[in-house]
Image (cartoon, grey):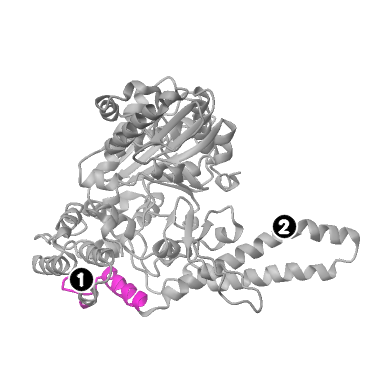
């Protein structure tokens, strides 16, 4: 079912199965027929853990989205609320229960249950008590869904407000969940002997993890460690990378259409199969929904390629598939025909996959060949190479004058600020004034949030360290090889993500070689050792030069050249748009 989670040396299916087992156990606690009322945000992440078929096996007959008012009718014994611990959601649940109890006076009584994801909350239970419905629940429990496997090398907590909470609201709840997630990993895959980190939040997570380890001393599983090292990186150590436009195939799909929980919705026109002689009157109107993960052979092959190399890869695949179908003419004997027929389902799936990705590539090409895309990318690359970062940019001025989407403007201004270690007060004030006069004065709160998060800031007397960091860590590579890459800089056609460079240097030759640069980046850098349970020291086999790393990195990177295998874990999968949106006040009104 989830073979793509176990293709690497780390079988992430173990993590998925552990989550499924807990879910089954909770459902079996509620004997009899069931209806689930979902917090809508949770449906995507849960879909990666368990399909409807699993729920059905455990007597789940109906599923509804949490909304105010009366619950839809369902002839079931149990109603289970799957919910995030948010006070505003408690008010909706209270409303649901009051109406249900009032309407159901003449019907058999229902048992209500609530499952908090990922943790129970005393504040939420107190709110339910104030609303007079806490006593209505037979079960109040928590479902610890921390790190969700998205692919064979990718885990995410999908904690959408983590950065905002840490840097704007001074709420460290997400750091506790991160530490618990790492403890879950160690319970399943063994103690991680080495911990490296950079940043204040990383330090907090490491401290909590070490404290939890001490509290559980003596109850550790005797598991041979799978991971050698965990690297914890704060997002604010590398503010630049998510602001830049991604240029890989998968990155551009995410930038243009948005990938959510492994799925993308695309305009349907390119996917319509028109028969000869037919007009376009019956073109589909529903978006085309595609699942994107390494289970699909072609997608696994092209997802991390720079988009300029995707056309050639699709053309090569088309020739291979065409040649495979031509083989039917050479099948003469019964055995040969039988063999061809047995391969047919796989070949047809490959042809369908090729047709889909060719259509997706055409959609992306329409955008990437546009003048607007090229102009935007040119300005980004000028900022990243340090060109004219200290003055008002005429392209940004023009975009504001044309009232381009506000998020686009905020991404560019933030990028200029980050690459210049802040903007001159005169330049920053000019941008702020233009934005507020063009888009509305209500956005003063958003600008304040970006300033608080360090994305938009006035330049103080201190010197701009970005050129030194760029040079020392080789963040910009001229003539990046997009077709046959030999360096991570190909993913942004020249820019090598800072967080990935830190990871590469840590692996070889070590952070001691860049002490001065590390001091220029925010927060402390540190190293910790964890004692392995007794008896595992001698048993443990050497990693043969290919240790696995669980790193909190911003995106997948092709770092195979280092001879190491990496598992990437994050609090939330983001791109520049979703990240800026999470920092806006009333973001729903900002998206065009």
Query: Few, some or many C-alpha atoms within 10 Å of disc 1 (few <14, some 14-19, many ≥20)?
Result: many
Vertical comparison of 137 with 36: above or below: above
Picture coordinates of residue 556, whole percent (x, y): 44, 55
Mark 2 lies on residue? 345
Picture coordinates of residue 137, whole percent (x, y): 38, 23
Residues shaded magenta: 372-394
Q: Which numbered marker is on residue 389?
A: 1
Residue at the (32%, 24%) spot, across then down: 134
**Which one is closest to the eye, mark 2 or mark 1?**
2
Vertical comparison of 432 with 217: above or below: below
Q: Is residue 268 magenta?
A: no
Q: Is residue 384 magenta?
A: yes
Picture coordinates of residue 206, whole percent (x, y): 32, 36
Query: Few, some or many C-alpha atoms within 10 Å of disc 2 (few <14, some 14-19, many ≥20)?
Result: few
Quarter of the image where the N terminus is located: top right
- Specify the quadrant of the image occupied by residue 342: bottom right
Mark 2 secondary-structure assignment: helix
Q: Of label 2 and label 1, which has the lower sequence position?
A: 2
What secondary structure is the magenta-colored segment mainly?
A: helix
Label 2 – label 1 distance at C-alpha: 55 Å
């Amino acid at each position: 079912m989830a073979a793509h989670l176990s293709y690497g040396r780390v079988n992430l299916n173990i993590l998925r199965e552990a989550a499924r087992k807990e879910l089954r156990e909770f459902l079996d606690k509620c004997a009899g027929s069931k209806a689930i009322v979902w917090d809508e945000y949770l449906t995507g992440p849960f879909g990666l853990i368990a399909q409807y078929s699993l729920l059905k096996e455990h007597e789940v007959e109906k599923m509804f989205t949490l909304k105010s008012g009366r619950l839809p009718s369902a002839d079931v014994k149990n109603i289970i609320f799957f919910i995030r611990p948010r006070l505003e959601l408690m008010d909706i649940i209270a409303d649901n229960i009051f109406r249900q109890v009032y309407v159901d006076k003449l019907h058999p009584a229902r048992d209500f249950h609530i499952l908090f994801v990922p943790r129970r909350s005393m504040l939420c239970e107190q709110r339910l008590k104030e609303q007079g419905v806490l006593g209505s629940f037979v079960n109040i429990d928590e479902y610890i869904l921390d790190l969700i496997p998205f692919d064979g090398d990718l885990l995410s907590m999908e904690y959408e407000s983590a950065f905002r909470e840490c840097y704007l609201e001074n709420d460290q709840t997400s750091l506790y969940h991160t530490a618990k997630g790492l403890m879950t990993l160690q319970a399943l895959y063994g103690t991680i002997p080495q911990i490296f980190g950079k940043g204040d939040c990383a330090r907090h997570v490491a401290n909590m993890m070490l404290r939890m380890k001490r509290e559980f001393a003596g109850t550790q599983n005797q598991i041979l460690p799978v991971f050698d090292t965990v690297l914890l990186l704060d997002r604010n150590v590398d503010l630049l990378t998510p602001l830049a436009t991604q240029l890989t195939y998968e990155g551009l799909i995410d930038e243009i259409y948005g990938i959510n929980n492994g799925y993308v919705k695309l305009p349907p026109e390119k996917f319509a199969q028109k028969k000869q002689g037919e007009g376009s009157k019956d073109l589909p109107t529903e978006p085309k929904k595609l699942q994107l993960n390494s289970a699909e052979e072609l997608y696994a092959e092209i997802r991390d390629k720079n988009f300029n190399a995707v056309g050639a890869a699709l053309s090569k695949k088309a020739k291979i598939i065409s040649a495979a179908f031509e083989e039917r003419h050479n099948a003469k004997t019964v055995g040969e025909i039988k063999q061809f027929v047995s391969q047919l389902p796989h070949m047809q799936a490959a042809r369908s996959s090729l047709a889909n990705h060719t259509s997706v590539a055409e959609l992306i090409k329409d955008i990437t060949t546009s003048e607007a895309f090229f102009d935007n990318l040119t300005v980004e690359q000028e900022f990243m190479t340090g060109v004219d970062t200290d003055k008002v940019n005429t392209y940004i001025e023009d975009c504001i004058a044309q009232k381009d989407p506000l998020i686009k403007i905020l991404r560019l201004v933030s990028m200029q600020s980050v690459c210049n270690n802040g903007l001159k007060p005169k330049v920053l004030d000019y941008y702020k004034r233009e934005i507020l006069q063009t888009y509305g004065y209500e956005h003063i709160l958003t600008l304040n949030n970006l300033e608080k998060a360090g994305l938009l800031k006035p330049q103080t007397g201190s010197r701009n360290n970005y050129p030194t960091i760029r040079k020392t860590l080789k963040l910009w590579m001229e003539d990046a090889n997009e077709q046959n890459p030999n360096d991570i800089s190909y993913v942004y056609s020249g820019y090598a993500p800072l967080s990935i460079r830190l990871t590469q240097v840590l692996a070889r030759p070590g952070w001691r070689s860049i002490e001065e640069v590390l001091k220029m980046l925010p927060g402390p850098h540190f190293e910790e050792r964890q004692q392995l349970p007794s008896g595992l020291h001698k048993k443990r086999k050497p990693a043969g030069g290919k240790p696995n790393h669980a790193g909190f990195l911003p995106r997948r990177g092709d770092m195979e050249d280092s001879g190491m295998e990496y598992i990437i874990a994050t609090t939330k999968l983001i791109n520049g748009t979703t990240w800026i949106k999470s920092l806006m006040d009333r973001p729903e009104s900002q998206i065009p």
